Amino acid sequence: MVNVKRVMSLKRIEIASKTLSLIYEDLTYLNLNHNYYRNIETLNISHFIEERMIYFSVMAEQKDLKVEIDIEPDVLLEIDKNDATRLVDNLITNAIKYNKTKGLLGIKVTKESLRVVDTGSGIEKKELDTIVCRFKRANKSEGGFGIGLDIVSQVIARYGYILDIQSEERKGTEVVVKWEK
């Protein structure tokens, strides 16, 4: 017989260890961002995001999120894999962390863009212009250091992508990264 308490405890430990790992990787990225060698390669971002969604499945399950994924096959980007990881992981983590329990997490990948949608707490209109600044947090009630969207913004600037964030308080947020101009 399965011990439900034990399984839930193990899931919480897994989520905590993944969270710590992501924080460490983000801080390392911020510290070394300008000094590390980038291996720009052709990355199948469709396959990459599918893999990352498997990685984040436990976190999404813990919040009982309805996950809708629409990924066009074989979307290829010229990007360093570490930069792609920082970009994708921060957007998905935010969409999970700031979402409501039993909310919606939507991921859409096309040749033109990546779209991440959540039905969470949203961001005040006055905060939208500065939300990508380092250490800026629109929602103080959730964990975080305010570095995720700063990292996203650095990756986007490095590759000439375009970032569009639309949000409404208590309704959710839509983040679009356009790689095709």
Image (cartoon, rainbow, N blue to C red):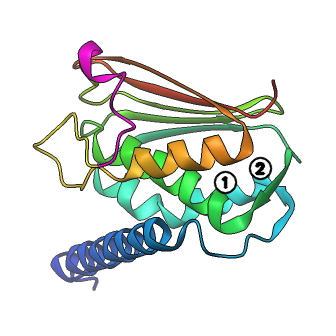
Q: Is residue 39 visible?
A: yes
Q: Which residues are magenta?
A: 124-134
Q: Tell me whether circle 1 and circle 2 mark residues in contact (CB < 8 Å).
A: yes
Q: Is residue 92 visible?
A: no
Q: Amino acid at mark 1?
A: Ile
- Mark 2 Cα shell of 10 Å, populated few (<14), some (14-19), many (≥20): many
Where is residue 80 shown, x and y percent of the image? 74, 63
Q: Residue at x 16, y 77 (%)?
A: 5
Residue 67: give its label: none
Is residue 159 inside the magenta stretch? no
Q: Main secondary structure of the magenta part?
A: loop
Residue tagged 1: 49
Q: Residue at x 52, y 66 (%)?
A: 55
Which residue appears at 24% of the width and 72% of the height? 12
- The answer to whether 25 is drawn above or below residue 102 in the figure is below
Q: Tag 2, which secondary structure?
A: helix
Q: How many marks?
A: 2
Between 52 and 104, the one lying in front of the other is 52
Q: Is residue 31 left or right of residue 101?
A: right
